[in-house]
């Protein structure tokens, strides 16, 4: 016979087993989520030159602190974020000690916004600019996990720890194959700094941006932090041709190429009836260029007829210029109708500044997306009335004209009545 004590014990074991069964999977799931979480390490230059007051009437350090506070507020919950400094602690003249001056201000992990802001508030411009050592340490901070990894370096000067070349450090990081991207931002840059920060970014497939205003710094860092949470897409290197007939055939994806100054590059895309091609291109000025430039993206038939174009112009306030287009291929009556070859032409009007090398070409990034085009049913769902908008417009116009006529007739009748 089962006693009440044994019954109670058995129920306790059952609850324990159920609890274990529910707990262990959730723990495993949490571990898996943590392992895949995107990681971002913000690396901030706190060297003595950050005292300069040339960003919107305030010091570079003050602008960086303001931007960091706004970025910390906007950081997505699923991003693990850390902050590393360089040149924040040693104010002396000993280069060896100055080039060891890098520290993790806030560890990479789940973000406590208040704690991170408090840490940033304590910073004051101090010492050297050990970019190379800071990048090596920042890569170590991001070790572990399977999610995307990104370093965002913000500096107002070139590295002061030669012979350690930060470009070589970036290439070494890229050679490890750990999928880490380094983006660089130059505060009020000069030519030498621009070249060095561009080289660092290019070595890992990152981007370089010149910054002269606080809002530019905030917006760009926010974009890069948000990008870390996006699915990782590995661009495919491709070489465009000098004419459509020799151009490589592209499918949906992300592609990179190099384009000479003022050169046209051609690519091919197959678009079946009922499909739509969407394309976007970005060309980056990774060296000093003339202040006025543009980029043109054209969709052209194999016979040379232009279908659609997208274009954009710049005046030197940004280092990347982008444009895009879309072309829907109409449904064919014949279900076996062949696909159409659409030629994509990319042309830029960049001009190198005096004394600047024109080779290699400018970095080009091309996104191609071939999707099913919108159906009439989709149009109705999207706009409520589909082609009925034309009827609605006609009815509105007719009603407006009828109202005017009725008002005129009514006034005429009243006038006649008063005079009779």
Image: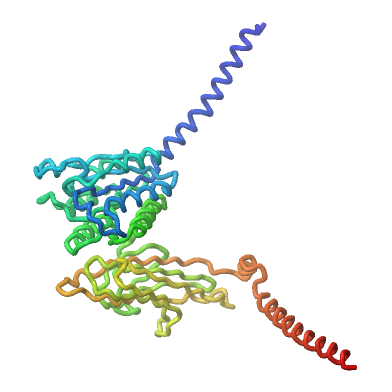
Along the horizontal axis of the image, is 316 left or right of 95? Answer: right
Q: Residue at x 41, y 75 (%)?
A: 310
Q: Residue at x 35, y 54 (%)?
A: 221
Location of residue 261 in the rendering, given as x and y in whole percent from the top left corner: 25, 75
Location of residue 25 in the rendering, given as x and y in whole percent from the top left corner: 49, 32
Q: Residue at x 19, y 70 (%)?
A: 359
In the rendered view, tell whether residue 315 sits above or below residue 149: below
Specify the quadrant of the image occupied by residue 12.
top right
Q: Residue furthest right?
A: 420
Residue 22 visible, this angle: yes
The quadrant of the image that shows the C terminus is bottom right
Count the marks: 0
| Viewer-side residue, 415 vs 336 | 415
Location of residue 159 in the rendering, given as x and y in whole percent from the top left corner: 16, 52
Location of residue 13 in the rendering, given as x and y in whole percent from the top left corner: 56, 17
Residue 180 visible, this angle: no
Specify the quadrant of the image occupied by residue 141.
top left
Along the horizontal axis of the image, is 210 left or right of 223? Answer: left
| Viewer-side residue, 3 vs 414 | 414
């Amino acid at each position: 016979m089962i006693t009440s004590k044994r019954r109670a014990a058995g129920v306790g074991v059952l609850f324990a087993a159920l609890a274990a069964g529910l707990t262990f999977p959730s723990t495993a799931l949490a571990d898996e989520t943590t392992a895949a979480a995107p990681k971002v390490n913000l690396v901030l230059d706190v060297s003595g030159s950050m005292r300069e007051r040339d960003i919107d009437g305030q010091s570079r350090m003050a602008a960086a602190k303001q931007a960091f506070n706004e970025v910390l507020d906007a950081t997505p919950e699923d991003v693990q974020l850390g902050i590393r400094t360089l040149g924040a602690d040693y104010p002396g003249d000993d280069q060896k000690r100055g080039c060891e001056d890098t520290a993790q201000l806030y560890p990479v992990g789940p973000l406590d916004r208040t704690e991170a802001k408090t840490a940033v508030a304590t910073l004051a411009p101090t010492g050297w600019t050990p970019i190379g050592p800071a990048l090596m340490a920042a890569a170590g901070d991001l070790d572990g996990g399977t999610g995307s990894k990104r370093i965002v370096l913000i500096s107002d000067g070139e590295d002061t720890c030669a012979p350690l070349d930060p470009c070589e450090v970036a290439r070494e990081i890229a050679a490890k194959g750990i999928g880490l991207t380094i983006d660089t931002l130059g505060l009020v840059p000069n030519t030498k700094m621009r070249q060095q920060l561009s080289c660092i970014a290019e070595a890992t497939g990152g981007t370089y941006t010149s910054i002269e205003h606080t809002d530019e710094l905030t917006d760009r860092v926010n974009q890069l932090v948000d990008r870390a949470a996006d699915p990782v897409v590995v661009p495919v290197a491709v070489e465009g041709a000098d004419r459509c007939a020799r151009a490589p055939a592209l499918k949906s994806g992300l592609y990179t190429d190099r384009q000479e100054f003022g050169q046209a590059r051609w690519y091919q895309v197959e678009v079946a009836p009922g499909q739509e091609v969407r394309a976007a291109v970005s060309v980056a000025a990774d060296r000093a260029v003339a202040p006025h430039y543009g980029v043109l993206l054209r969709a052209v038939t194999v016979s040379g007829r232009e279908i659609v174009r997208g274009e954009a112009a710049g005046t030197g306030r940004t280092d990347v210029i982008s444009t895009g287009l879309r072309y829907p291929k109409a449904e064919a009556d014949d279900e076996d109708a062949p696909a159409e070859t659409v030629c994509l032409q990319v042309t830029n009007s960049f001009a190198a500044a005096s004394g600047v090398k024109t080779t290699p070409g400018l970095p080009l990034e091309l996104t191609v997306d071939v999707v099913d085009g919108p159906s009439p049913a989709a149009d109705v769902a999207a706009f409520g009335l589909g082609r009925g908008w034309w009827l609605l417009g006609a009815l509105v116009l007719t009603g407006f004209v009828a109202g005017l006529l009725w008002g005129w007739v009514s006034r005429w009748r009243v006038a006649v009545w008063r005079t009779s």
